[in-house]
Image: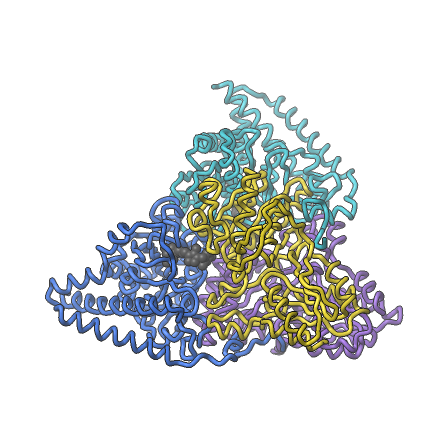
Chain colours: A blue, B cyan, C purple, D yellow
Amino acid sequence: MDYDRRHVVESMLQQMLFIRLFEESVEQDALQGMVQGGVHLSIGQEAVAVGVHHALQSQDYVTGGHRGHHICLARGMDPRIMMAELMGKATGLSRGKSGSMHLIDPDHGILGLNGIVAASIGIATGAAFAVKYWQRSDQVVVGFFGDGAGNKGLFNESLNLAGLWNLPVIYVCENNQYAVETHVRQSTAGGDLSHRAEGYGFPGITVDGMDPLAVWEAVTQARTRAVNGEGPTLIEAQTYRYRGHDVGDPQTYRTKDEIADWRERDPIEYLTQMAMANEWLDGNTITALRESMQREVDAARRFALESPDPELGVALQYVYSQGGTGWQN
Amino acid sequence: MDYDRRHVVESMLQQMLFIRLFEESVEQDALQGMVQGGVHLSIGQEAVAVGVHHALQSQDYVTGGHRGHHICLARGMDPRIMMAELMGKATGLSRGKSGSMHLIDPDHGILGLNGIVAASIGIATGAAFAVKYWQRSDQVVVGFFGDGAGNKGLFNESLNLAGLWNLPVIYVCENNQYAVETHVRQSTAGGDLSHRAEGYGFPGITVDGMDPLAVWEAVTQARTRAVNGEGPTLIEAQTYRYRGHDVGDPQTYRTKDEIADWRERDPIEYLTQMAMANEWLDGNTITALRESMQREVDAARRFALESPDPELGVALQYVYSQGGTGWQN
Amino acid sequence: MAELSFGRAFAKGLSEEMARDPNIVVLGTDILMRGGHFGQVAGLGEQFGPTRVIDTPISEAGLVSLGMGAALLGLRPIVDLNFQDFMLGAMDELINQVAKWSYMSDGRLRVPLVIRASDGAAHGAGPQHSQSLEGWIASTPGLRVVVPSTPADVTGLLKTVLRQDDPVLFFMHKMLSAIKGEVPDEDVVIPLGQAAVRRAGDDVTIIAYGIMTSYALQAADSLAIEGISADVIDLRTLSPLDVQTVVTSVKRTSRAVVVHQAPTFGGFGGELTSIIQEQAFDYLDAPVVRVGARHTPVPVASILQEAVIPNVSDIVQAVKSIC
Amino acid sequence: MAELSFGRAFAKGLSEEMARDPNIVVLGTDILMRGGHFGQVAGLGEQFGPTRVIDTPISEAGLVSLGMGAALLGLRPIVDLNFQDFMLGAMDELINQVAKWSYMSDGRLRVPLVIRASDGAAHGAGPQHSQSLEGWIASTPGLRVVVPSTPADVTGLLKTVLRQDDPVLFFMHKMLSAIKGEVPDEDVVIPLGQAAVRRAGDDVTIIAYGIMTSYALQAADSLAIEGISADVIDLRTLSPLDVQTVVTSVKRTSRAVVVHQAPTFGGFGGELTSIIQEQAFDYLDAPVVRVGARHTPVPVASILQEAVIPNVSDIVQAVKSIC
Ligand SMILES: Cc1ncc(C[n+]2csc(CCOP(=O)(O)OP(=O)(O)O)c2C)c(N)n1
Ligand SMILES: Cc1ncc(C[n+]2csc(CCOP(=O)(O)OP(=O)(O)O)c2C)c(N)n1
Ligand SMILES: [Mg+2]
Ligand SMILES: [Mg+2]
């Protein structure tokens, strides 16, 4: 058990570190205009994606919203082709067509991030429907979404369907307190969003989203429920984005103090302390780890930068599954 | 108090009787093809509309769904021009353009029935927004909808807005157990729909929708809350339609016994017994009342039948508020 | 050959495909026992049971989204939206999601999702149950639109649709539900993007689809009496569109009338007209004339509805105005 | 005259109208402090406070429906939907409800609701944030569509819109947000349905609106060098549509090119083309040519976007193909 815990903590720490460094690199490039389109960084929210990932199996599926780099990296997306996609390169996942908000990687069970708030909730529900239809006994779907998504209609329609049909889906709300400038208490009636699950007859819980172990535990339980045919769970992870809504956000809507308070609970810091206190890792190992991660990020970045632009014809491909734009027969 | 109660009971009984007779007349005409379009009768559900009406003031607004004749009559719509509208006549409310599902009567605060499930919820919320904006201190809006509407997205969006902004709106769900053939338990996860109100931080209660006095009390309380600035209430009234979903429904999905059980709780019967037991009304008075109502229904029907068809030009009017079809300048 | 109604023809095609492919499921309101409001899935509940013929809550957005998620994994859901008007509650799901996934995934994922809905005007249905929105869907890159006009086409096109991988909107005009026609017993598939010439003529080309095909044919009958012979083309699908059949005919007849039940202004007829004048300009002896509904919602009262919806005589007059 | 950006021009018009009419309120995400994502309501939060400049949850359907309910009582809400793409989440509310209430109530109720949204392609915005859906709305009986191309028009059209009673979709192309132009200090209103002739010419009529107006003008500049003189018409509103200005010009020039950023196939250009050939057939020396986007979603990478979105040289070539 202690060994397991050590193993998990080390693995989580490694993933969170990698995500953080990856995102910091993306941020710099975005500021330089090297990234195509708006960029929504997950810095500060690493614990949610990493906690969820550790509770999942490789055959599980995920969907996410516009802020989902951490989800993709946690689930195993290749950082090089991901970075190339962010920069709109020919080597990118979708050869530059989808970009940051719409990363899709079926090979890693990533059915898609999404530029439309709440859409991920419905798609995850549908994937869970298929899993249940085929009676796959050890597979679940996680639908990530933000606090802002709980007030979209699709939330009601999908959670009702999942509750009604006992679908193997886990809804993970990353409550990072804001939707752009709007604080969750200014958008959401009735307190914690997790309470709304009761209206659909399944459990909703709020967990500390800065603690990957807490997220891991909650999702582990939810996954067990799901594969046992007991249906969905709504998990609201209280977390925080250290950066603005997108790169370039002037962030006039919150105080430095508020950011500082949340940073005190930084998940990377927290697990680092835990690992060191337990003598699982020492300072040198951590420095070495960080350096090797940074090298990997740099390599991904270099790969992307050195990759060619896509051929223009790519833009006309796969409007339809046979490959073309095909409105005409 | 007892006098008040007597007064209320008599008034309710009178309204319910009138609605029942009106609907029976519509049913006959619908079977004969005299009514334009699908007809969704409210027979069995009279107590909800009448109970709500008695708790409202004349300045209050209502919206409703596709099954709303009872709402319109309770609020005071003229049965003659209503009947004429059902039959698509020139004398009808909208000169035949809107028909049964889309009755609109601003003079009686009826902002509109609606052919789209759940739409009434959002429109009522908006009217309440205006009432609050103008700080009208003694006005509320009631949004009627069916049990089938609770699983539409708009339910979530609107109830959240109402909860967030404390709007003076009362949501009345007429749970008549079915949406077409689908029983509410086959469509709605989590038990009583009224529970979902908790997720938005305002009260949701389930009342006996076959008892107009129970409805009246619940709405009276909700109205007091609303005008006191305490925000919305969701009231789920358990009721039943004695007829099919629409005229012509083969009704293979329920048993005669189920219908008989609900009819034992018939609201007209119930208030009649109460009035007679209290010696407020005797058999003769009730017979006379029924006869005079029937005459009024017959007169409405005659008025409609004798009214001319609309001029064809009516079809081209009021696409825009200035009167025309006006796509061209 | 069996004589089947439009609705039954759908049920037949679906039944055969469901028997062939266990990944096809159908979801919608009141379909398990009732078989849908237009009899379009009658008997399937009995045949395949509630795991494959699934009664749902009234949640159009949730169902389209659910269908998409399931389709991404390889299921082949048919979501029956009942009236086309209710599709408006699922537009984000259709346009921002379903339509874009093949493209955004650069072909790595596909959405073999079929949406069935009944469109068009029916006496008494009124403004919120009578719309003809096929043009919007046809204009959306990534979606396919099928608008059959005969029972045989319903079966044949449905079979095709269920054997390909693009999302398809399958629109069946509600006033066609009860019409009958021969449907082959054999497994006949009809390719998408192949219009049918329903009647051959030399003086004018009438281009229609769905219910307006029969109006066009009736108009052609009247016109024949007056010595005007019309080529009547039934497009069958709007996306992909069979441009060649249309243009070839117009080059021969030099005159074209485009017909649909949607309002003329902003309708799909504008696309057809544009293509014709782009590709056959030098052959045209007269402007292409469009016949569609007036720019109004569809009113409830029958006589008012008839005042705004195009009819056979509108088509006849349109043809005469250019012949 | 002040030089204002497109976004500021909106704020100016709205500010003046809100000062005039206490029944105007504006609702949307992140508008109170931020002033909207395109600066379109900058300063209004300070000026009018949170009871009239209202930050909302992300609930497009709920807000359009709320706006409608409030408008039925006589309030004049502006619902700011941010990106036009998000309007897809409120289509039932817009098309089945807002558009139909005047008609269904036979004129007894009206819906003075304004929906503002930013449309069109912007580098990097990608498939779900770049659409041009104005044609769908224009085709809907009961709705009005405003597509301004200059700051002065933004102010002048907004003022008009807020003084009439029909529901209006006010679409501002996101790449125009920062362009600047003179806006009169006085209270100038611009009637709906009145196109502007932005440049006079004799050889060809180029019909555009919104952002494509400036592309059309640039194309006209290039063409002038080559001796082709173009009339450039900016429609300003699609519903009501100024047919007369278009047809009069084409009758004079005998050639027309229709331009928009939406995909050509199924776009509003089909309507314009049809009207032209219906009303000026005998004057046309060549087919009307449409310039629009390819039939694809709008990809994220800039160079890919440019491969599908029409540009100045596409317009030049289209003109040359018929001149
Ligand atoms: C339907 C829709 N409405 C509005 C937007 C614009 N938008 C993008 S992100 C965002 C805020 C989302 O907040 P939240 O769900 O809390 O996610 P977070 O950004 O905090 O991760 C908004 C309003 C959108 N993308 N989709
Ligand atoms: C958005 C939408 N989806 C489907 C329908 C078709 N439809 C009309 S009434 C109805 C059942 C509604 O049930 P409920 O809300 O319980 O009202 P009731 O008929 O019982 O009064 C359905 C599915 C519709 N009108 N609107
Ligand atoms: Mg958030
Ligand atoms: Mg019901």
Give residue C284's position: percent from left, percent from top: 79, 74
Q: Quadrant of the N terminus of chain A?
A: bottom left
> Which quarter of the picture shows residue B197?
top left
Q: Nearer the viewer, residue B321 or B191?
A: B321
- Residue at the spot 68% in from the left edge and 31% down from the top edge: B294
C75 relative to A210, above or below:
below
Q: Quadrant of the C terminus of chain A?
A: bottom right
C196 relative to B66, above or below:
below
B271 relative to A217, above or below:
above
Give residue A272's position: percent from left, percent from top: 17, 64
A239 relative to B56, above or below:
below
- Residue at the spot 72% in from the left edge and 51% down from the top edge: B325
User: Is residue B31 visible to us here?
Assistant: no
Point out the quarter of the image occupied by ligand 1: bottom left
- Residue at the spot 54% in from the left edge and 22% down from the top edge: B7
Q: Nearer the viewer, residue B261 or D140?
A: D140
Give residue B302's position: percent from left, percent from top: 75, 35
Left or right: where A285 falls relative to D90: left
Q: Nearer the viewer, residue A319 or B180?
A: A319
Q: Residue furthest right?
A: C226
User: Is residue D122 visible to us here?
Assistant: yes
Image label count: 0
Left or right: where A154 falls relative to D192: left
Q: Residue furthest front?
A: D1
Give residue D317's position: percent from left, percent from top: 65, 76
> Which quarter of the picture shows residue A231?
bottom left
Left or right: where C91 falls relative to D103: left
